[in-house]
Image: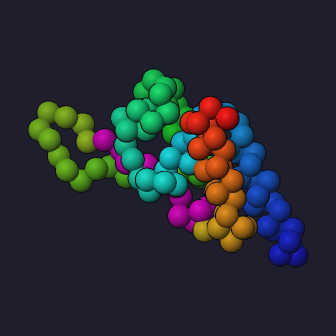
Amino acid sequence: MEINESISIQEKWEQLINKHELRSDIWAILDLHKELNITKLTHYVKQGKTTVARHLKLMEEDGLLVSRTATKYVKGRIPPKIYQINPEFKQESVELGKITGKTRKNFSNSLNGR
């Protein structure tokens, strides 16, 4: 019964991540940096804020990511949301055999042009 549960977790993860290539890039970056705001994420993935924001919102709705509002307040500015991989989902993926490592390798290869 554990095998079926593991397979379903991996299938769910792959299905959610494979909806768009940008999702796997975001996942790999957040896996490396732990948490980032949208401005830093757009810098790393070289996409516009609206595109990244849309994917972050959908990934959060799917349960892949969680967000929090930054605690530092600058008068006249809206505090940014900080995104990170959902710890519950990440724990399940680690138990599955480091499926995040596969994504990190794919992301590294794409940055190197392989």
**Residue farthest bottom in this picture:** 1
In the rendered image, which quarter contains the N terminus?
bottom right
Q: Nearer the viewer, residue 1 or 37?
A: 37
Q: Residue at x 32, y 49 (%)?
A: 69
Up-down: is 93 above or below 57? below
From the top left corner, tell me how far across and down residue 108 is, in percent: 59, 44
Percent from the top left, x then y, of residue 40?
Answer: 37, 38
At 14% across and 41% down in the image, what residue appears? 74
Q: How many marks?
A: 0
- Magenta stretch: residue 81 in it? yes
Q: Is the C terminus in the top left, top right, bottom left or bottom right quadrant?
A: top right
Task: Magenta stretch: give its range.
Answer: 80-90
Percent x, y of residue 73: 17, 46
Image position of 42 with respect to 63: above or below:
above
Seen at 81% across and 68% down, the residue is 5
Picture coordinates of residue 59, whole percent (x, y): 58, 43
40 sits left or right of 56 in the view = left
Q: Is residue 92 visible?
A: no
Placement of 48 over or under 21, stated as above or below: above
Residue at the (26%, 42%) spot, across then down: 79
Residue 6 visible, this angle? yes
Q: Is residue 38 magenta?
A: no
Whether 38 is drawn above or below 70: the answer is above
The colour scheme used here is rainbow
| Residue with the most extreme left position | 75
